[in-house]
Amino acid sequence: MGATKTEHFTDYQNHIAILTKALGHPARIAIIEYLMSVETCICGDIVNELPLAQPTVSQHLKELKNAGLIKGNIEGNAICYCIDEKSLTKLRDYFVNISDSLEKKKSNCC
Amino acid sequence: MGATKTEHFTDYQNHIAILTKALGHPARIAIIEYLMSVETCICGDIVNELPLAQPTVSQHLKELKNAGLIKGNIEGNAICYCIDEKSLTKLRDYFVNISDSLEKKKSNCC
DNA sequence: AAACTATATCGTAATATTGCAATATAAATT
DNA sequence: AATTTATATTGCAATATTACGATATAGTTT
């Protein structure tokens, strides 16, 4: 075995897992933070920002894109990557919900 | 090769990545949601809630615990797992921050 | 068109994750 | 003390991820 049994879980659970899994690497967190830090999204220098080889960065970008966390538009011979707001809003809503619920039932044993 | 180059990233980036990575599996999302749904945290029946064998569930619980997302207290011969509020608050703050920043710079090209 | 620039893909080695049967541990019950 | 119950650990096979050199692709510049 070794493959995740996605069929046993809900679409929502699988989607949240896809988003969090895609963020589950420091290089991909760094990419998101870099995309946040630049003003425009015409940013063809992500490779220079990261301590990893170009093919590795390209692969990380692909994973973020597959998960729907970033979008990439061809801009001449460069590619303009930027954050896909929708997916990050979804994650925010998910964690805000959890934190709110935890706040309400402060009566726990641990 | 094959191992993540954590040393090149900040402690904060690595920590967020550890938390999101731990959540990056539908079974672990399901565990978190189950822990949210039960009133008390005396819950020794997580295995029955999930479509996975007992050792597999135990392993997922271990990963959530290692990441600091849940806590486990021994309660007789059962173990009382519950969510570690701090780590989920940290994730909430992280994504609230990102969403707020994205809201502010609506002027993007894509 | 040749050279350059930016990015993607291929191939592959090293490592990590997923899942489970078998077994171990340890408290509770009989 | 033997049995049961709840959970963890071990060992292993299948699969996935991480990283990068080499190479491909495609637009840009000269």
Image (tube, coloured by chain):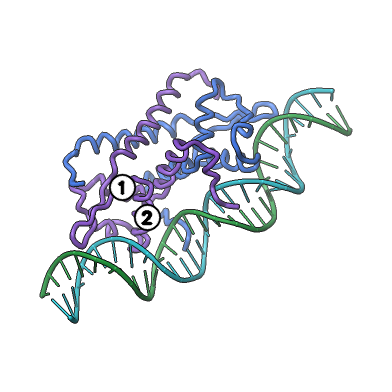
Chain colours: A purple, B blue, C cyan, D green
Q: Position of residue A86 (x, y in %)?
A: 30, 38
Q: Position of residue B7 (x, y in %)?
A: 41, 55
- Tell me which chain the residue with mark 2 is part of: A
Q: B84 or B61: nearer the eye?
A: B61
Within-10-Å neighbours for mark 2: few <14, some 14–19, many 20+: some
* Residue A51 location, quadrant: bottom left
From the image, tell me which residue sits under label 2: A60
Quadrant location of the C terminus of chain A in the rendered image: top right
Q: Earlier in the sequence, mark 2 or mark 1?
A: 2
Local SS, label 2? helix
Left or right side of B72 for A57? left
The amino acid at mark 1 is Ile
Q: Nearer the viewer, mark 2 or mark 1?
A: 1
Left or right side of C6 for B42? right
Local SS, label 1? strand
From the image, tell me which residue sits under label 1: A70
Within-10-Å neighbours for mark 1: few <14, some 14–19, many 20+: many
Q: B51 or C24: nearer the eye?
A: B51
- A45 versus B40 height, above or below: below
Report the label total. Answer: 2
- B101 versus A99 height, above or below: below
Both marks 2 and 1 on one chain: yes
Q: Position of residue B24 (x, y in %)?
A: 46, 43
- A66 versus A107 height, above or below: below
Left or right side of A83 for B105? left
The amino acid at mark 2 is His
Residue at 52%, 34% in the rendered image: B30
Q: D8 or D15: nearer the eye?
A: D15
- Tell me which chain the residue with mark 1 is part of: A
Residue at 40%, 27% in the rendered image: A97
Residue at 40%, 24% in the rendered image: A100
